[in-house]
Each structure stands twice: as structure tokens, then as C-alpha cells.
Amino acid sequence: MADLGILILRLGLGIMFFAHGLQIALGKFGGPGPEGFSKFISGMGFAPALFWAYLAGYSILTGGALLILGICTRLACIPLIIFILVASRVHLSKGFFLGNGGYEYTFVIFMGLVALMLLGSGKFSIFNKL
């Protein structure tokens, strides 16, 4: 059952990150694309913003795909953890709870990624060594 739990966690987080990566990297599903996302992150002090927008978009797109497939799960979690920690910065001043705009959601995502880093891909993966 543990391997089934890992698969469910991998798929849930992987699909979420892959879809979000499509929004940022390619502007799909009503997303801002790299140009729109770069405007957002330039306000956070990232320069050159377009470079960071492409890096973020393709990192989470690739990381999400790797989680879905179970390829190098532990390594795939690293850029996703960095992304979600940076995303949390936006919400820190609003406290914990999501209803107040807080970091509750990003906290849960972070904890799921940490769990996958510790557990690895599980038995139901294409490549479960890393």
C-alpha cells in the first residue's frame, strides 16, 4: 500500500506542477506565458525577469513530468521545492491560512515534495533508482 500512496502523491503533485508549468512556460490554460510571468516576478526583484520566468516555467514543467513518470523523483523535487519556497514568499506576510491569502497551500505542497524526496519513486514508476 505504501507504493500506491507514493504513486498517488507523485501523480497529484506531478499533474499540478505540469499543468502550472504549461501556464508559465507556454501560456496554456489561461496562463500568463513567460512574458506575463516575467512582469509578475520582476516586482519580486528577479532580474533579468524573462530569464527567470523561462527557468521557472520549464523547471516546473519538466519536474512535473518527471514526477508523473517516476523518473528521478528525488532529483526532480529539488527545483520544485525551490519554486514553491519562492512562491511562499508572496504569502508569508498574510499569515498561515489560505482564506487570508496565507501560505497554507504552498506549505502542503512543500511537505508533499519533502515526503517524495525521502520516499523516492516507489515501485510503480518507470525508473525508481533516484
Image: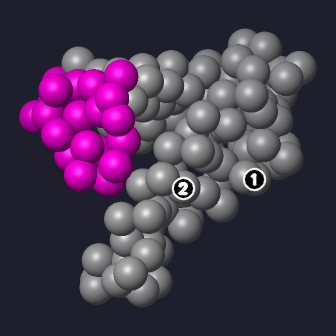
Mark drawn on residue 115: 1
Residue at far right of view: 129
Q: Which of marks 1 and 2 is nearer the N terminus?
A: 2
| SS class, disc 2 | helix
Q: Magenta stretch: residue 44 in it?
A: yes
* Comparing labels 1 and 2, the label whose residue is closer to the camera: 2
The kind of residue tagged 2 is Leu
Residue 31 visible? The answer is no
The magenta-colored residue range is: 27-51
Give me the C-alpha separation between circle 1 and circle 2.
Answer: 15 Å
Residue at the disc numbered 2: 85
Using residue 78 as the reference point, say whether residue 98 is left or right of it: left
Report the residue at 52% width, 34% height from top: 14
The kind of residue tagged 1 is Ala
Residue 87 visible? The answer is yes
The quarter of the displayed image where residue 66 is located? top right
Using residue 129 as the reference point, say whether residue 93 is left or right of it: left
Vertically, is 97 above or below 83? below
Q: Where residue 35 sits: x, y (%)?
A: 16, 26
Using residue 127 as the reference point, say whether residue 29 is left or right of it: left
Q: Which quadrant does the C terminus fall into?
A: top right
Q: Where residue 105 sits: x, y (%)?
A: 44, 66
Q: Magenta stretch: residue 95 in it?
A: no
Residue at far left of view: 30
Mark 1 closeness class: few <14, some 14–19, many ≥20 residues within 10 Å: some
The quarter of the displayed image where residue 50 is located? top left
